Image (cartoon, rainbow, N blue to C red):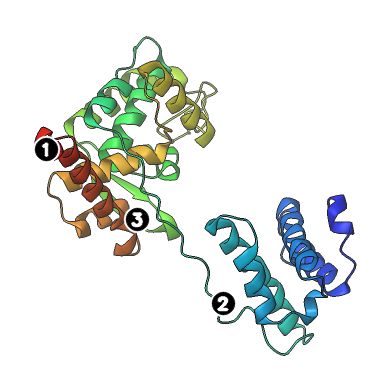
Amino acid sequence: MRNIISNITDESTKDFLEYLKYERRVSVNTVDSYGENLLLLKNYTNKDLISLKKEDIKDFLDNVEATARTKAHYLTVFNSFYKYLVFMDKIKSNPCDGIKAPKLEKKLPTYLTNEEIAKLFNIRLTKPVDYRNKAILEVMYATGARISEVINLELNQIDFEECIIRVVGKGKKERIIPLDDVAIEALDNYINNYRPFLIKNETCNYVFLNKNGEKISRQMIFKMLKNLANKAGITKEISPHTLRHSFASNLLNNGADLRVIQELLGHENLETTEIYSHLQNKKIKDDYNNHPHAHF
């Protein structure tokens, strides 16, 4: 723990932090962060944390200078702490009960325009890894697959005849996603003509390999995307999830039903998918504002 945690003198807080560290096996950084947040509350109220009432915590949240997201995090920490105290029979009730977290402004996902996609995908193909990168981009944009699903994709999960891939998503749920002709061509070209140059172990079934013949890492795909975006002159913050957002946005703009998009993305709840409706509404509004008549 950092020195700031040693400033916490009350036994209940120390016990809670020890519980997080040793029983819950929470990371050291998280334990430190929880300790700092609790110390902040103690210093603000100038009271023992074990004696605080709901009004004390509400007063802190109302007056502390912080973003809504940070305040919501504070409340999560405090709630966890007081739940622990209730469980240990140190207090009778949780003073955080009934306190509503601040409403967080929904951040609309970043997506790429068709022009930006064309620029990003315009890769100079000279080495086997270039063809691999091209195939990765085409698959991610054609399927909206998560980065974890792409790096774990195996050869037997691709059906070239049916033009589909089978991916294993969250909760180990399998879903089938169609591939377009461009993605099929890029995959076929990479697997048959360039993947053999990367193979070091014939038993390795992962589709996308690094130069050592091992499964490509998340970090490598992040780095690859960043480099390609810089070369293409794209200033937006781009990550693998940007291609997933672009896939969904493109489908919606072309009239696809939200439930179909939900199925393709592997979303558990339709609410998660509905963020793309907000994205479409924003695009319509932006397009309208750019229309010359809108300024009359």
Q: In the rendered structure, which disc, 1 or 2, sits on the residue that comes first in sequence?
A: 2
Label 2: which secondary element: loop
Q: What percent of the width, then of the height, locates residue 289?
A: 19, 39
Mark 2, residue position: 99
- Horizontally, is 136 left or right of 219 in the view? left
Up-down relation of residue 285 to residue 19 (above or below): above
- Give me the C-alpha separation between circle 3 and circle 2: 39 Å
Mark 1, residue position: 296
Image quarter (top left, top right, bottom left or bottom right) of the C terminus: top left
**In this rendering, does residue 276 appear at all?**
yes
Up-down relation of residue 198 to residue 35 (above or below): above
Amino acid type at image mark 2: Ile
Q: Return the residue found at the far bottom.
A: 92
Q: What percent of the width, then of the height, locates residue 196?
A: 40, 20
> Residue 174 — which label?
3
Q: How dense is the environment of label 1, judged by Cα within 10 Å: few (below 14), some, or many (20 and up)?
A: few
